[in-house]
Structure formats: structure tokens, C-alpha cells
Amino acid sequence: MPTPMPHKLVTLQRHMLEQQSKFPYATGEFTSMLMDFVVAVKLISREVNKAGLAEVLGDAGHENVQDELVMKLDEFAQDRIYKAMDHGGHLCCMASEEEKDLIPIPPQFPTGRYALMFDPLDGSSNIDANVSIGTIFAIHRRKSPGNGPGTVEDVLQVGNNLVCAGYVIYGPSTMLVYSTAAGVAGFTLDPSIGEFCLSHEDIRMPEKAKIYSANEGNQAFWGEGDRKYIQYLKTPDKDSGRPYSTRYIGSLVADFHRNLLYGGVFLYPADRKDPKKPAGKLRVLYEAAPLAFVAEQAGGAASDGKHRILDIQPKGLHDRTPLCIGPKADVALYEKFLREAGDH
Ligand code: AHM
Ligand code: MG
């Protein structure tokens, strides 16, 4: 039986062009840049979908497996995004969770007005178990003058300056969710035609959470405020909708996406588990700020416990931050618990 037609058939490209047409001086450059990115994402989606199969082929000892199939998927994702974005003339530089340093545009290609930050394959430790993973992206307008090579100044900006951010989730279907500061929209990839089609128009985060997501195995390393907050969410109180349910995948994009749609608060606090990572595990540029941008655009909030994530001024490409992200009321309550415990 054919798939029922949605009442409105809007491709991602059409949606982007419509968004852009609201700005009188828009050139279409932004849409063109994102469509380059989407090519890489479709390739990643294809490879993720056959990840298990690639392993079977490997185990069987076939020698003629394409190089692509044996490449680790996170390296593959990094490579494809880079190759899709390096020559379009839209970017002045890139930065990735997978690369220590700023990624320049090769000198033979033109440079442009934007800087791209991305986490090519987040949650990649889940790949072998066939659990949902994602790609996270964010775009700044360049800060450095002129149109030469970009500098770290172009990516080390507060999240508040972002012009676009979003993510792709590789789950039972592949979805792209993005915002250009005019709300949040979600598109599902129809693999038969290779198009992302609008499936979630104007996504709004529920006003209050009923789910919490945190790696409670780390509780012994958390501060008092974090422990008390999670304990509070588990303490029954019918009137305020407690206890919350726990859902933790350990794939930020998948945890965030579910919470965005169903109403949930995600917490990855600072912890004392690894002295090299006192601010927790998640990165400002590639994880926290892009998702904070999407959360705020959907009516939610994101905080490090004290500051709004989008106000954080990153000092290094791989700065980390505690992250509490979800409905406004839940994030505000988290900040209150930390204040009262004197944490931070
Ligand atoms: P990664 O960027 O190396 O994939 O790590 C980030 C992932 C997130 O997707 C997820 O929220 C977190 O690590 C889970 O960490 P933990 O295993 O400590 O709960
Ligand atoms: Mg990551």
C-alpha cells in the first residue's frame, strides 16, 4: 500500500528558500550552503543504515569491500562533511569535534561569509548496538574582516550569534531538525527519492517535562545540587507530575530529540569522575550551543546551571560545559537547586 500523502509536500530546500524569501536582501547563498551539507548527511545516513552489514562483510573476510565500508563511521562522517563543504565558497573555516585544530578552506577554493561547527557522528559508541546516533551542526557569520581565510575568532563566538543550528538523527528513519532563528522544523528523509520532506512543522517543546535523562551511574561524582535535583524529580507528588520517568539512551541527539517531542529534561552535569574534564563531557561548540539554540527556538531553555548556554563565551575549540536542557520551568528549577546547594 502506498504511503499516505501529507497534506502539504514541502522539501527541505523549498522550506529554506521560503524562510530566506522573508529577508529582502537574501541571495540564496545560505540555502545553497545548507544543501551542500545535506548531501553529506545523506551519504552518512546511507552508511549508518548498512553499518551492521559492513561488519558482516568484514567478518566474512571479503577483500573487495569498498574502502568506505571499512572506514570507521565517525571518520567517514567527518570526511564527507569536509568534502561537501570545503569548495562551495560559502565558508571561511570549519571546526569539528573530531579535529583538534581549526579546519581551513584549502587555498585553491574561494572563502565565504560563514563558519561551520559540527559533531560529525555524536554518540558513536552506540553504533555497534544499532542505537540511534546523530550529526550536530551550527553556523556563525564570520567575524574576521575581509574575505580571506577564517580564524578561530569566527568559531569562538557566543551561541547567541548563531544564524542556524540543527541536527540529524539516524534512527528508524533519518530526520533533520533545524532552526534559522524563526522556529524549529523537522524533515524526514524519504530514502526512495532521497529528499528530506517536512514532517514536523513548527516544533514546540512541551512546557513541562515528564521525563528526565541523565547518566545516574555517575551520581557519586556529582555535586550536591545535581543529586538533590534528580532526587526531587523522582520523589512522588501528583500535583507537580512527579515522579518523572527516566529515559537515557546515551546518544545526545536521540535523547534531546525524544525530549523535544515528548517533554523531557536532559542533564549532563559537571562531575569529578575525570579530573581532566571537570565541566562534564559535552562540548560547547559542537553539542551544547547548537542544541541550546534549537531548544530556545522551540520555547525551551538550556543552562550550565548558572548561565544560559547561549551566553557562554568559548575560549577554546574543545571547551566543555555542564548541560541542562529542556522546558524552561525545568531548567529554571535546576538552576535553583544548584544555587541553593552553593554549587558552581
Ligand atoms: P561523543 O561525542 O564522543 O559521542 O560523546 C558524546 C556522547 C553524547 O551523545 C551523550 O550524551 C554522552 O556522550 C553520553 O555520555 P555517557 O556515556 O558518559 O553517559
Ligand atoms: Mg559528540
Image (cartoon, rainbow, N blue to C red):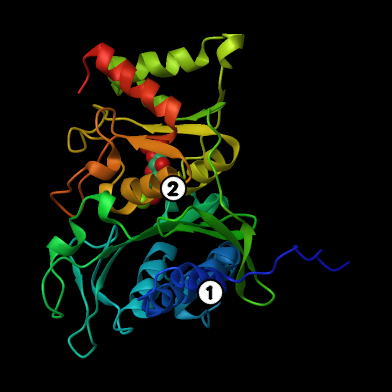
- Decide: marks 2, 1 in contact (CB < 8 A)? no
| Image quadrant where residue 300 sits | top left
Q: Where is residue 205 in the image (x, y as percent from the top left)?
A: 53, 39
Bin the neighbour count of mark 1 within 10 Å (Cα to Cα): few under 14, some 14-19, many 20 and up: some
Q: In this view, does 74 lie above or below 242?
A: below
Horizontally, is 281 left or right of 154 in the view?
right
- Residue type for callout 1: Gln
Horizontally, is 231 left or right of 305 in the view?
right
- Residue type for callout 2: Gln
Q: Earlier in the sequence, mark 2 or mark 1?
A: 1
What residue is shown with label 2? 297
**Residue found 13% across the figure and 49% down from its top:** 315
Q: Foreground residue, 240 or 222?
A: 240
- Measure the alpha-carbon separation of dots 2 and 1: 20 Å
Q: Foreground residue, 126 or 343?
A: 343
Q: Which mark is residue 296?
A: none
What residue is shown with label 1? 13
